[in-house]
Image (spheres, grey):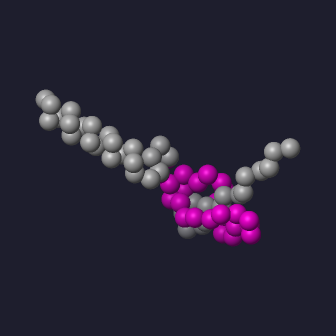
């Protein structure tokens, strides 16, 4: 039983250090488009298919 808990703890720790933990895989945090704005950051996401996932820059507070 101790071996089982050890393996489980190692897997849990590994999942915490992997990038993107806690994010829905393929979700786009902005909007999907064929072209992104000049100031937008872009990436590819499954949710957008063959389009870009465009993430606008953060808005400045007043």
Q: Does the segment drawn in magenta span residue 6?
A: no
Q: Is residue 4 above or below residue 43?
A: above
The magenta region covers 24-47
Residue situated in front as seen by the camera: 4 or 26: 4
Residue situated in front as seen by the camera: 45 or 57: 57
Location of the C terminus (image quadrant): top right
Q: Which residue shows up at 39% across the image and 48% down it?
A: 17
Q: Is residue 31 above or below residue 35?
A: above
Q: Does residue 59 appear left or right of residue 14 in this picture?
A: right
Q: Which residue shows up at 70% across the image and 63% down it?
A: 40
Q: Is residue 25 above or below residue 8?
A: below
Q: Which residue shows up at 61% across the image and 61% down it?
A: 53
Q: Main secondary structure of the magenta part?
A: loop
Q: Is residue 3 above or below residue 44?
A: above
Location of the N terminus (image quadrant): top left
Residue 32 percent across, percent down from the top left: 64, 60
């Amino acid at each position: 039983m101790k071996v089982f808990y050890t393996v489980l703890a190692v897997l849990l720790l590994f999942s915490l250090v992997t990038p993107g933990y806690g994010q829905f895989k393929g979700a786009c945090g902005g909007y999907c488009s064929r072209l992104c704005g000049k100031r937008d950051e872009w990436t590819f996401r499954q949710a957008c298919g063959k389009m870009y996932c465009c993430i606008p820059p953060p808005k400045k507070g007043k």
